[in-house]
Image (cartoon, rainbow, N blue to C red):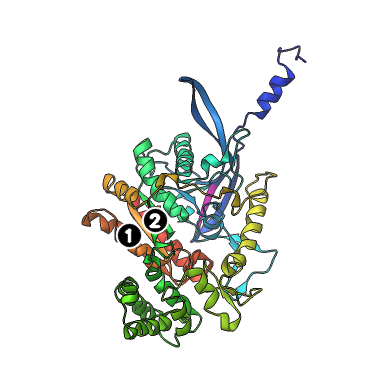
């Protein structure tokens, strides 16, 4: 059938309707921070990513490949050249940006409660008086298949479910937003959490080498830059020592170190992890009976585990087994993301806990808050489920690292050498059992940068876990620390 007025067929109209387009919506808001009223604009929705396509050597146009969901906060009336902008994302792989968005950085935050005083449903949102928006515009990015982000019709989402595809797609989002909003001359920052720190480090090098976009700073929250430090297996003794101070911190929190100060407990654990413990693991069966007995005693005392257990696992305490074993005598399991949390399990004889007590405690508040907030306050509607954690991204591809460890230390080092003004802020949670603080320190100490650039790296420590901001005193302090970092690294 043909439209008599313009000659357009119904098939043509259908084809046009199927072509994806940006669905951004804007809204006006305000918040008072330290008696200063901030008027800001939110822009929420999906941006279409396109790729230059060649067919048989001929240019075939910029074809849509994916739609990426973003939430942007810009301060009204600000000078773009002087105003910093922070691009933020979480990790997973497969996590949306909801955690940093509504937990720490955004102008609105979820009231989730903390250990022992979790907020019951239906939960609440509150103004975040410590929002980083007071110092930087904010762009929250949900990588493909997370949040509302999806591959377009006919495209393969698996292209984005891997290290390089993820880097390139998120990098393209950052380039597009920067260009469309006239922000190439603004101070620019990346804030990543967990796998998002690996993404941020990779992006720093990618943005420089691909687009010539040099950043002012990276905010690495619960950092993991080299998977060797997390890969517990019979051929890799490295993580057993690097996780030891975290075990000590968690044991201390649960009263297994008596009235000793946390700093004292950590100092003992770090000293043992730095020298005697790796030596003992390296010796293997060459240890004498007396030497092995001494290691068993010291390791049990530091971890809060029994000497019998330490002996039975051959001096090697794997992290998920630790969370399952530590409070077995109390019929409790310990959280992996945050070892301060505990919960029940169905079977206290099993080796591995059924779920992460800390993740289960905070998922509900964040999911409810996001699904309400995006519709009621940001004025964006979408019938897709908002994927807080997308399981469909697995197996995640690391084909670029075939035959070697997954690590971005070389990329971060290269980015810092090429851009000596790049500053790095690293945030650690003492009770983080997913990305142990001592393991991250180990990686940072081995970056291939000259001594004069090491002062570009600063560290901050908090008495909480992976999402340290669920602990209110840590949230307030971390907000201040990040604000100070952005102000000092903006060069304005």
Q: What is the secondary structure assignment of the residue under circle 2?
A: loop
Q: Which residue is mark 1?
A: 444
Residue 287 vs residue 11, the one in the foreground:
287
Per the model, the C-alpha gap separating discs 2 and 1 is 9 Å
Circle 2/circle 1 CB separation < 8 Å: yes
When the figure is inspected, residue 46 is found, relative to residue 93, above or below; the finding is: above
Q: Position of 261 compared to 44: left or right?
A: left
Q: Is residue 264 magenta?
A: no
Give percent across and percent down for residue 119.
64, 69
Across and down, in percent, residue 44 comes to 59, 43
- Residue pictured at 48% horizontal, 68% vertical: 433
Name the residue rendered at 61%, 77% in the picture: 348
Task: Give the percent coordinates (x, y) of residue 206.
Answer: 38, 42
x, y percent for residue 323: 52, 73
Give the residue number, with chain letter if any, for mark 2: 225
- Residue sitting nearer the eye, 82 or 165: 165
């Amino acid at each position: 059938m043909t439209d008599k007025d313009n000659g357009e067929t119904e098939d043509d109209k259908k084809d046009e309707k199927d072509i994806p387009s940006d669905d951004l919506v804007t809204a006006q808001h305000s918040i008072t921070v330290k008696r200063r009223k901030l008027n800001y604009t939110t822009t929420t929705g999906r941006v279409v990513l396109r790729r230059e396509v060649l067919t048989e050597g001929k240019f075939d146009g910029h074809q849509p490949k994916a739609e990426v969901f973003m939430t942007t906060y810009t301060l009204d009336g600000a000078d773009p050249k002087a105003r910093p902008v922070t691009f933020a994302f979480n990790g997973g792989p497969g996590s949306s940006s909801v955690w940093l968005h509504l937990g720490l950085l955004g102008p609105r935050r979820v009231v989730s409660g903390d250990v022992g005083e979790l907020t019951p449903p239906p939960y609440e949102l509150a103004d975040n008086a410590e929002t980083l928006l007071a110092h930087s515009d904010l762009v929250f990015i949900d990588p493909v298949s997370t949040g509302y982000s999806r591959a377009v019709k006919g495209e393969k989402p698996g292209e984005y479910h891997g290290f390089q595809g993820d880097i390139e797609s998120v990098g393209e989002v950052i380039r597009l937003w920067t260009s469309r909003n006239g922000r190439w001359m603004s101070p620019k920052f990346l804030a990543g959490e967990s796998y998002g720190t690996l993404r941020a480090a990779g992006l720093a090098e990618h943005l420089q080498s691909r687009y010539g976009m040099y950043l002012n700073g990276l905010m690495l929250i619960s950092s993991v830059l080299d998977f060797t430090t997390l890969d517990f297996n019979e051929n890799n003794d490295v993580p057993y020592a690097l996780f030891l101070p975290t075990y000590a911190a968690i044991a201390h929190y649960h009263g297994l170190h008596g009235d000793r100060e946390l700093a004292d407990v950590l100092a003992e654990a770090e000293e043992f992890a730095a020298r005697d413990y790796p030596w003992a693991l390296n010796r293997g069966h060459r240890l004498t009976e007396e030497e092995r007995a001494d290691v068993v005693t010291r390791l049990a005392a530091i971890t809060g585990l029994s000497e019998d257990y330490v002996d039975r696992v051959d001096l090697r305490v794997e992290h998920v087994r630790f969370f399952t074993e530590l409070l077995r005598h109390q019929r409790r399991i310990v959280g992996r993301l945050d070892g301060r949390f505990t919960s029940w399990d169905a079977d206290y004889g099993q080796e591995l806990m059924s779920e992460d007590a800390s993740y289960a405690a905070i998922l509900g508040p964040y999911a409810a808050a996001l699904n309400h907030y995006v519709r009621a306050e940001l004025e964006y509607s979408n019938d897709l489920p908002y994927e807080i954690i997308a399981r469909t991204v697995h197996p995640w591809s690391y084909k670029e690292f075939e035959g070697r460890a997954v690590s971005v230390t070389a990329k971060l080092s290269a980015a810092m050498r090429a851009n000596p003004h790049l500053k790095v802020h690293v945030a650690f949670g003492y009770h983080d059992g997913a990305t142990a603080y001592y393991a991250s320190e180990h990686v940072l100490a081995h970056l291939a940068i000259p001594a004069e650039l090491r002062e570009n790296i600063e560290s901050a420590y908090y008495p909480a876990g992976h999402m340290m901001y669920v602990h209110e005193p840590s949230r307030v302090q971390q907000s201040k620390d990040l604000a100070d970092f952005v102000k000092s690294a903006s060069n304005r």
